[in-house]
Amino acid sequence: MIKTKRVYEKAETSDGTRFLVERLWPRGMKKEAVKMKAWLKEVAPSADLRNWFAHDPLKWQEFEKRYRAELKANPDAWTPILQAAKRGNVTLLYSAHDTEHNNAIALKRFLEKQ
């Protein structure tokens, strides 16, 4: 099972293997405070795509389409997540305030189709 969770929320054993899927480090978080297997910067949307989207829900569908294209072009970035998901639960950590329109949600949908 692949889940998503804000990086600011408490880690739980049910999270399984945790991956930070942000290009930028979350504000106010100390690296030693984030319980995770890895920070997968390369699986996050490109800087250009992230800046274009700017967390605008009206751009969500187009963002997902463009992000899927980036992911398809870079399978090495997301393969470790799928490998971990075969062994147990995986949680994708994100820092956005919007819990419905963020790259972790789009990544989860993409991975579930792989």
Image: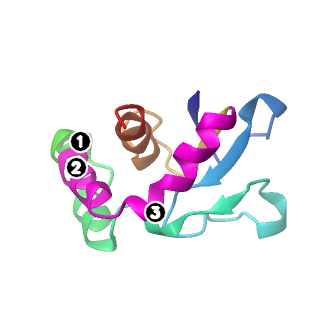
Instruction: Give the image quarter of residue 1.
Output: top right
- What's the residue at 55%, 48% (across, down)? 81
Pointer 2: residues within 10 angstroms few (<14), some, or many (20+)?
A: many
- What's the residue at 79%, 53% (across, down)? 35
C-beta proximity under 8 Å, tags 2 and 3: no
Closer to the eye: label 3 or 1:
3
Q: Mark 2 or 3 closer to N-term?
A: 2
33, above or below 41, in the image: above
Total numbered labels:
3
Indicate the secondary structure of the residue bearing disc 1: helix
- What's the residue at 70%, 65% (across, down)? 28
Can the viewer see residue 21? yes
Which amino acid type corresponds to the residue marked 1 in the rendered image? Trp
Q: Provide the residue designation for mark 3.
A: 77
Mark 1 and mark 2: span between their CA atoms?
A: 5 Å
C-beta proximity under 8 Å, tags 1 and 2: yes
Q: Mark 3 or 1 closer to N-term?
A: 1
Residue 14, percent from left and from top = 77, 28
**What's drawn in magenta, residue-wise?**
63-88
Q: Provide the residue designation for mark 1.
A: 60
Any magenta on residue 72?
yes
Mark 3 and mark 1: span between their CA atoms?
A: 22 Å
Residues 16 and 114: in front is: 114
Residues 106 and 83: in front is: 83
Instruction: Give the image quarter of residue 4.
Output: top right
- Mark linked to residue 69: none
Indicate the secondary structure of the residue bearing disc 2: helix
Q: Provide the residue designation for mark 2.
A: 63
Residue 52, percent from left and from top = 22, 63
Q: In screen coordinates, is 69 left or right of 55?
A: left
